[in-house]
Amino acid sequence: MEEDGAHSRRTFLKVAGSAAAAVSLAGCLGGGNNGGGGGGGGNDGPSGTLVYSRGAPSATLDPQNSTSGEDAKVINQIYNQLVQFKPGDVSLEAGLAKKYELSGKTATLTLREGVKFHNDEEFTAEDFKATFRRFTDPEYEYYPGDTYISGYAAITLGNWVETVNAKDKYKLEIQLKQKFAPFLRNLAMFASAVLSKKAIEEKNKKLNKEPVGTGPFKLGQYESNGERIQLEYNDNYWGKGPKVEQVIFSTIPENSTRAETLIGGDAHIIDGLGTTASQKVQKADGVKLNAFEGVNTGYMAFNMERFKPFRKKKVRQAISYAINTKVIVENIFSGFAVQASQPIPSNMMGYNKDLDPYPHDVEKAKTLLKEAGHGDGISFELATFKNPRSYNPSPLRAAQQVRSDLSNVGIEIEINQMSFDPFLNYTDSGKHDACFLGWMSDNADPDNFYYSLLHPGVESPAGQDWVSFDTEGYNTLSVSGWANKEYMKTVEDAQKMLKESERKSLYQKAAKIAHDEAPWVFLDHAKELRGVSNAVSGYVPSAIGGPYLNLVSVGGE
């Protein structure tokens, strides 16, 4: 997801960047007990308020209307999936389906009984059937439209599912169009959250601000365009927790202010940290910096449709040689990341250990540009976002480094920086020349990188290795427009292989093609960073799914 999500790809503190504004949170942070539990916990009941502060707001609370990690953080508190990721792990466990199996092209799921949506409707197989149709079927009466439905519709379910059959009230049978190894993992993604059939019929697009799920928390207030979101505990939750009465998601765009808010006791958990803010948290009393290995990638994509020189492989390779990714990772990102050589990080199946990051080689870059017919240089726009992301904690400084490096080989760039949601709309529609982007895996499967980000979802015209963004069915998550036929076939074949050993070798081949063809400048794979108050217990940092705030307690201070 573009982190988050990625749509998707602003604050309880109305004065962005103001330390004084953080005081407005004072008094919201109730004390509590460490052993509180919610309706599903069966103990003393929830207590206190948990404040989670981040750098950007949620634009929507409808899981079918977003690819944004910021949206997912809140959506995952409100909704559940049929299958879910274990907290702090990448393995699967039962969600709304207590049993699940994938055999060949058939997935069979047995559902939990007695689960209630926030509108008090009982969850049944018909709810998932309606969820699937609303997400993928333009003929469905309640399909909210192509411009509303996110790009996840195709890559999670639409491309793979032939039929969804409600065999009875608590039994689902899903027939796939082909063997598709990551399917159960796709069911655990936030975009596959189960909606209420009744809510679909009564609210439809209003679900973006009036969500109805089965999760541990339900919406209390949605304010200031998602800058402040207040959630109330669900006293009829089927699972563990919740242990707090309220969760408040607040938006504090400035990294340093967000760190000060945590250190000053006006937030319990913060994320999206830049390097300076992370170091500030590390040195402070009463809080800790939680750093753990992520499942992500950061990159600079070349839009081959919009900017013709990018259609030449030697131009793309030249830029990859010219940019000093080692300086970006070690100096600007302060060692909280490693250089990338391919789309996936080293902790994923299919990682190709034989590939090295492009070295910084100015003379090689100049030679390649000359051979490509651009020895006199080129100029283009580099679009980027303002707020830090896990995969790019200092986007402006990184963009400035790119500009400096490219100037050494005769390339001029203009940095176009914007807020995250407008930025995602801009890149989804292909208005950029080049752009910074990144991805936090939704399902810890290589397909979630190789297909989701670099397969156009459509065939390329004969004789070219790029596709226009306005091609019907185009995968808008692929912001490069790259359409290499050998790469596409390799990734498609890997989807159909159920044996991990066979998939592994295919992804290693795909990595080599991507590395050599350079549709991206491969920047980094970053650690996930969280600032956590010592008043918090039960918080399980997770690179996939979550945050699991139903497990969190807030102690007295």
Image: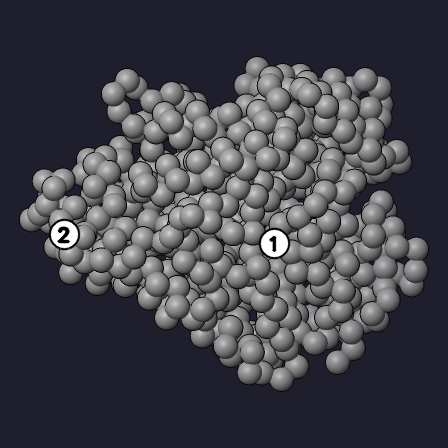
**Distance between the Cα atoms at labels 1 and 2?**
39 Å
Q: Which is more toward the observer, 318 or 255? A: 318
Which residue carries the number 2 mark? 366
User: Disc 2 marks which amino acid?
Assistant: Lys
Q: Which is more toward the observer, 89 or 507? A: 507
User: Disc 1 marks which amino acid?
Assistant: Ala
Q: Position of residue 231 (x, y in %)?
A: 70, 54
Q: Which is more toward the observer, 527 or 468? A: 527
Q: Residues within 10 Å of mark 1 (few under 14, many from 20)?
A: many
Q: Position of residue 494 (x, y in %)?
A: 53, 29
Answer left or right for 401 relative to 177: left
Q: Position of residue 535 (x, y in %)?
A: 72, 75
Name, please, the residue furthest toward the left: 376
Q: Position of residue 78 (x, y in %)?
A: 70, 46
Q: Earlier in the sequence, mark 1 or mark 2?
A: 2
Label 1, secondary structure: give it.
loop
Can residue 458 be seen here? The reply is: yes
Answer left or right for 549 relative to 179: right
Can residue 147 be seen here? The reply is: no
Question: What mark, if any, has residue 543 been given in the picture?
Answer: 1
Q: Is residue 260 above or below residue 493?
A: below
Q: Nearer the viewer, mark 1 or mark 2?
A: 2
Q: Is residue 265 above or below residue 375?
A: below
Q: Is residue 510 above or below residue 356?
A: above
Question: What mark, if any, has residue 216 been given in the picture?
Answer: none
